[in-house]
Structure formats: structure tokens, C-alpha cells
Amino acid sequence: MTAHEIVSKIKSKKLSAEELISQALKKAKIVQEKYNAFITIDDKAINKAKELDTKISNGEELGLLAGVPVVVKDNICSKDLRTTAGSKILETFIPPYNATVVERLEAAGAIVIAKANMDEFGMGSSNENSAYGIAKNPWDSSRVPGGSSGGSAIAVATGVVPFALGTDTGGSVRQPASFTGTIGFKPTYGQLSRFGVVAYASSLDQVGVIARSSQDLALAMEAMSSHDKNDSTSIKNTNLEFLKSVASKKDLTSIKIGLIKELCNEGNSDDVLGILQETQKQLEGLGASVETVSLENVRYGIASYYLVAPAEASSNLARYDGMIYSNRVGENSEGQIDIMMKTRGELFGPEVRKRILMGSYALSAGYYDAFYGKALKVRKLIANDFARAFESYDFLMTPTTPSVAYKIGEKTDDPLAMYLDDIDTVLANLVGIPAISLPMGQSKDNLPIGIQFFAPALKDETLLQLSNIIEQNSTNFAPIVKI
Amino acid sequence: MITDKDMQDLQKLARLKVSDEESHHLKDELNKIMAYFEQIKDLDTDGIEELARPIDSFNIFRADEQIITYSQEEALKIAVEAEDGFFKVPRTIDND
């Protein structure tokens, strides 16, 4: 069922929230058994469902998402529900407050049933860097689901929930969506509040949504996006009306789309290039014009991103030192510094340790200008390229990833190989613009392939409209994977 | 090139101890990754400003009024160690 259908059935009393949430929890447990999609499943969700049922029988007014079960990535704080960020260092952390996005979903009547598995602190593209075990792709369980929001993508692809929250620092919502045949949406930087979201790289982090239906995506965005006084980067007064606008257009007449030349070449697998061509034809069939456009600096995106993100991470993750909160390793008599070094060395996983040291290096005296400072200038060059292209095009497009979901363990030995796969997605984060991955087809081996669209900053609604038009003109768009 | 000595310094800087074996392995990985980053060194960025964040940041002000967030008890629930209403941490300054 879509979120729209659930809300309608709950409101018309055809289904009780208790019944619905109990089914969702049951399915979550089956999915957990097979794919390790969750870090915590919350059986207490059933109590919230009962409370909602009482509200319904009392005739109280119900919110936009009444009774909708949702899954939230485990780096987004949930009050009284453990939030680990996929790390041992936060294994016992129970937040005393909700992230604003969770607060707003719950205020609208949604019920959080589970916290999703993820790469530790969002650092990874395969969900292999979770301290709580590797998650598996429901299309082929020998393959990765993508990451870092791997668990959220699995929950949506298998139909446990109609939509789930992820976070996207360099593609962590769009890439797992691409690998699982779902829609992955990263809004404009600042469109969704980051208050209560475990920080990885603050100038790149953004909460995103994974869904199977464009209209459900609009519903989720409608419930969550408005200014938050608790987040100094939250956009003021954008007045976007996602629900009103999502289905307001029927075709793509007079829409101009630019295919980014540098990212649509032989660096992609044949399967991906095939789907890219089919997508182009479909878009033209719907009235759009599609042309190739050159953005010459996008080739430096990975270098810029993997200097900026670890640098910010090395600073953000300094708070996990075993002193105030998180866990502590060692005896107090060893002294503060030794305990910090031991705690961080033992409780952070290998990829996190690597990125913290890498970021510390990029920021250290003598290297700042050559690396971090230079990376920020390259970031500006890339932003300029996009600004120039958006003077002529409504959307820009690329594959979401150069290939389909790969085998578990296939890329763990080569530190650069996995980073390079993020070439298409990191650009939206560097520039701060919205981007969406749409499930446009499958490979010869029946694995899903996503195509990514970028829009100018604050044009989030247009990406949802585009998604809806394509969805309405497709068959078997974002299907539920049978388990 | 990052050396083994650099790795030791970085660990102190980041307050993060890794084993000697891992340190050696990480040094090789980081050198490989940093070599890839070298490509941006030759890029002409004269006169280009640094883009540290995608939107302008601004200060948020509010009236200096007391608001209730959590009780001390609630806040200390997340503490690694707490005593008499305080966070308790290992000794920071030695007696001698």
C-alpha cells in the first residue's frame, strides 16, 4: 500500500492503526532475518498505533500521515529509541529528543517502527561498514544494497513501509535507491532540518527520502519541510507546496534537459548506458528536449568531495571521545588523553578511523591550502558549471551510479574504487542543489538501474513533478520486491 | 608522501590510536588516495573563492529567555558517568 492509501483506509476506519502497524512490524522482522535491514525494531510502535486508534474513535482531527509506518535511518535521533549511527561508539545512546524531521513525521501521525542499518556515520556506499553487520540487497542477496542508507532502501523496496528517511552526504539516499529500484530524493541543502541528525560533513549533509511513489514522496516532504529555528542552515520561507504541485503537470512539453557529457560516457557499464538511452527516448516522447552539455569540472568532483567530507568529519566526530556521552574504553586512572585515544581507536570502525585521519591530514598545517582550501575552490568551479548549465536547462541528468549493485566484498580491498563510484552523486552535495534518482529500468541480470536528475536550488518541487510524470507513464515503476 | 612518523602525529592530533600494523597499512592507503587528489593541484583556481558551504550562513538570535528543554536528570541519562548532578570524567590535570 502507498502512504496515501494507508491514510485513506485509516481515516475511513477500514483498517485500524494497530492492525496495520502490527503487520508492518511482522514484515520488518522477516526482512530483518533475510537482509539485516535494521539496527533496532521498535515493538513499542504498537502502543503509538493504539493511541492513534483511540484518537480516531474520539473523532479527533488526524494528520497528513495518520497511521503510516515509517523507517528512519539510525543516524537520525528518535526520542527514547536507541540511535547508533551504525557505530559501536553510540551502541547505548538513547536520545532524549527527536530530530525535527522525526518530530514532524510523528506530529503528522506517522509511526516509526524501526531504525535502519547504515554505514557507520554515513561513511560508505555499500552498507558494508556497519558495526551491526552487512545488509543485503533484496534483488540479489549476494549483492550490496548500496549505502550509506542501505537499510532504509531495503525497507522501502520490500514494502515494509511506503517511505523511509535516509541522509545524503554524497549520494547516500540516491545510490541505495538506484541499487534497490526505488526513488531516492535529496532536497536542496537546508530544505529539511538537520537538527537531531548525527553530523558527518555539515556543509554536505542533507536528510532525504526513499519511496516507491512520487506522491508519497510529496506527502513526506509536505509534512517535514518548513523552516526550523533549531537549524541555522534551515531555509526560510520557501513556501514549497509539494502535495499541490506534484501532479499538476501531465507531460514535459517545453522542458529542456541537459545530459552531462563527462558522466555519460564509457565510464559506465553497457547496461547503464542502455537505460540512459532509453530514458532519453522516453523523456523526448513526453515532450522534453534532451541535449548533451559539457560541465568540464565535474571530473574533479570526487577529489573535492573526498577532501571536504573527511575534513569536516574529523572535526564533527571529535565529540565522540568517551567523556560526556557515548561509550568509554579504559580505566579512569589512565588519564583523559589515553582514554580518548583508546576509546576512539577501539569503538570507531576502520573506515571511520581512516576518514578521520585523512581529514586531519588535509586540514593540518602545511597542507591546508594545497588540499582543503584547493578543494573548496574546485567546489566553487563545479558550482559555477552547474549555474551556467541551468541558464539553458531545467534539469541535468546522469546515471545515478556507473554500474548496478555489486557483490558483497567486491570493492572492499580497493580504497579508491568505491569512492570513484560516487562520481555522479557527490555533485549535488558539493553544489547544494536537489537531485533525485529514479528507477528507470533493469540490467540483463534483472538488477535495477537508476537515472539521476538535478534541478537548481529551491526547485525541489519540479523534480517531484518530473518523477510523477515518468511514474505515470511507466509500467511496473518501483515494484515491491517479493521476499 | 605521508610517512610512518606523520601517522603517529596524526593519531595524536585526532586523539585516535590505531595499531602499528593498521597505521602502516593506512599510510599506504592514504598515500594512494592523496595521489589521486594531486590532480586538482594543477587546476587553475586563481581568483576563485572558496565555497565552504552551499548557502549563506547567518546568525540566529532569540530573546534571552529561559526555556524548558530537559531536566538535569534527563540530560544526565546519556552520560558515560555521572555523580551528584555532574558529568564525571577522568582526571584532566595531574596533581604533580
Image (cartoon, rainbow, N blue to C red):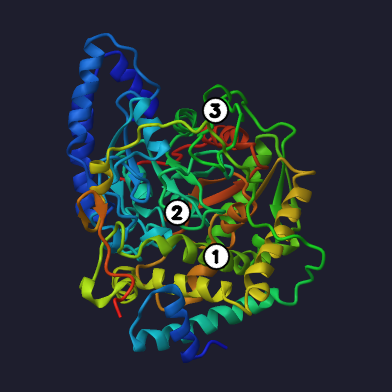
The residue at 31%/62% (across/down) is A323
x, y (%) of residue A190? 56, 42
The numbered dot on residue A242 is 3
- Give me the C-alpha separation between circle 1 and circle 3: 34 Å
Q: Chain of mark 2?
A: A
Secondary structure of residue under mark 1: loop
Q: Viewer-proximal residue, A446 or A59?
A: A59
Q: Residues within 10 Å of mark 3 (few under 14, many from 20)?
A: many
Q: Chain of mark 3?
A: A
Residue tagged 2: A199
Instruction: First in sequence, mark 2 or 3: give its number.
Output: 2
Residue tagged 1: A269
Closer mark to the observer between disc 2 and disc 3 = 2
x, y (%) of residue A422? 54, 62
In this view, which residue lies farthest toward the right?
Answer: B47
Q: Residues within 10 Å of mark 2 (few under 14, many from 20)?
A: many
Secondary structure of residue under mark 3: helix
The residue at 30%/50% (across/down) is A83
Quadrant of the image containing the N terminus of chain A: top left
Above or below for A5 versus A466: above
Residue under disc 2 on the same chain as residue under disc 3: yes
Residue type at mark 1: give it: Ser
x, y (%) of residue A428? 60, 52
Residue type at mark 2: give it: Ala
- Give me the C-alpha separation between circle 2 and circle 3: 27 Å
